Image (cartoon, rainbow, N blue to C red):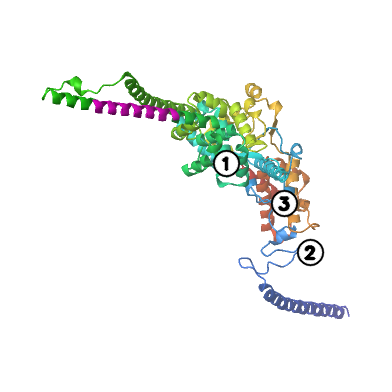
Amino acid sequence: RSQQQLERRRATRASAAAAAAAAAAAAAAAAAVMEEAGGAAAHENDIPGFAPGSGENVGDTPMVAGTSKMLAKLGLTHNPYVDRTAEKSLLKTGAFYLHSDLQGFRPSETTYIFFGKRGSGKTTIRLMMMQKYREYNENQVAQGKGPVFVVDLCRPGHMDECLKEFMRTIGADRDNWDANFAESWTSNDLADCILSFAINDMMRRVVVATREGKMIVESLSRNPRAATQFLLLAHLYTREDTATLNALRAKLLPIAFSSWKVAKMVVGVGAFVGALGAAGMAVSSLAKSSSSSSSSSDHGAGRSHGGVRSLASQLPSVSPKQMGYAAGAACTLLGGALLQRRTRSLEQARAKQLCAPLRVANARPDLIQGLLHSLFSSDDTADRIRGLHIGHSAQQKLELIESLARACGYQGLAVFGDCFDEVGLLDPLMYPAALKVFAREVCKNEVLNQGRLHFFFPDARASLDLSTDRIVREARFDRHFVRDLSWSRFQLEDLAERRFLAAQREAGNNSPNARFQDLFKHVSKEDFSGAISKLATPRELMVFMTELLARVEAHSEDGKMVAAQDMEIAVNKALEQSV
């Protein structure tokens, strides 16, 4: 009986297993049919270049065609950590971490100096500041007020051209550039770089006749002295062609050419015409006297029946008055020619003397000579002209260009300087001393006191040798906003979460199922804190997070997120790419 019961149980189990196998086979066949039908329908909406079937949904989060399952599971349409530089980022404001002392920034007279290694967020802050200036200028123009003129030394090519011209002027080459630059570069040359950018940019706006160009011409028409300064600086620091300078002179030279200069020209022309008239009268008197003397000589010779005429009888009789006319005319013409030659020689020397101190632009004395002749008298020396319109020191140059900007209708002048390590002749790897000297000349009180200066240097203050007692006294850092950019573990974690949430909102997921913390649910707090604390800059954080998401995507079939081993590998990758 026991044997029979055992056999019945085995038969029951076998029949149940067979039924389960048949049900599984039927389900698999039905799924294959449904997949084939669904695939045929999905192929109608496929986008070329993306894998078929990429439009399926994962949970409640819709996937964009081509989006990986891992991103869709996190509520993202793209990796929010692939941006490495601020210039190429298209993220919104919520994706950035803004330091508390920069929140509420608005254009003012404050000078800002930032120090930080590459990738520490300097360019992000600079772009944010420049955006605030653009918004401020738009608001000023809408109210009928003057905007702030922005000097962007970060514009590609400007500093390169200035330094190449400086190299040519001092007779250096790339082999001895580091030493020669350290010996020769001064804050005056830095001010010349600022002047060069400002005047060339203004000149282009005037010639092209933009809205601000028309404002400049209209403002200068009421101020001949400012028009004179504008013309002089444009010819000294020009990087434009002759046609542009001719167009500029056609618009501004009538304004700068004042009434007393016109009167002086009229007097000079009158004196020259008077001299010509006196010479003409003398020649006419001599001709009449010669004719009468010849007639009397012929009559006397006829009466003397062929007597020999003496030398005295052949000469015309000239009165003392006629001799005075002739002598005065000859002396006037000769003196005028000699004076003109001497004046031309003096003007050439004055033009060369005015161009000599300029080392960052290719000043042309031949252009300056004609302009000086039109705008200034011969009594105005090069030193006096420089003191009135250009400046001798860096502080005076910045003050004069500031006053010119105000005379042109602007509210003032703002200067931005960044990415100096990307300038070829300031590369810290090739020329270690050049960038330090450049930063030292910027950090002088006579320059920083100008206000509205915003400089960003690609290293710590101590690494640039700007922490010595002498530099601190010269720069007076206590009077200006000076910041060494450093990032803590909490700030970097906050930045990573901001990027994550901003990308979810951009994808339209205002209430996403996945959170930033879900990425690290399989990692202990100690491992997470230890990994983040090894990073020093936002750029290292971007590399770290990109590597983490890549490793999560590579193991997405396991259904797991970040593991402790992934954290260690990502940190090493970030530190390897750090510079």
Mark sitting earlier along the chain (3/2): 2
Indicate the quadrant where residue 366 lies.
top left
The reply to whether dot 3 and dot 2 touch (C-beta < 8 Å) is: no
Mark 2 to mark 1: distance in Å? 54 Å
Quick one: 552 or 59, which is closer to the camera? 59
Residue 273 falls within the magenta-colored stretch: yes
The answer to whether residue 556 is above or below residue 210 is below
Whether residue 19 is visible, yes or no, is: yes
Q: Which image quarter is the C terminus in?
A: top right
- The disc at residue 60 is 2
Upstream in sequence: badge 1 or badge 3:
1
Q: Which residues are magenta?
A: 270-292
Q: Which residue is mark 1?
A: 201
Which label number is shown at residue 563? 3
Task: Judge whether 502 appears above or below 143 on screen.
Answer: below
Dot 3 falls on a residue whose secondary structure is loop
- Label located before the other in sequence (2 or 1): 2
Q: Quadrant of residue 5?
A: bottom right
Q: Is residue 330 magenta?
A: no
Which is the main secondary structure of the residues drawn in magenta? helix
Spatial separation of the CA atoms under disc 3 and disc 2: 25 Å
Q: Residue 571: give x, y in percent of width and height.
A: 67, 45
Secondary structure at numbered mark 2:
loop
Q: Is residue 375 left or right of residue 100?
A: left
Whole-percent x and y of residue 84?
A: 64, 47
State the separation of the CA atoms marked 1 and 3.
Answer: 54 Å
- Local packing at callout 3 (Cα closer than 10 Å; few below 14, some 14-19, many 20+) is some
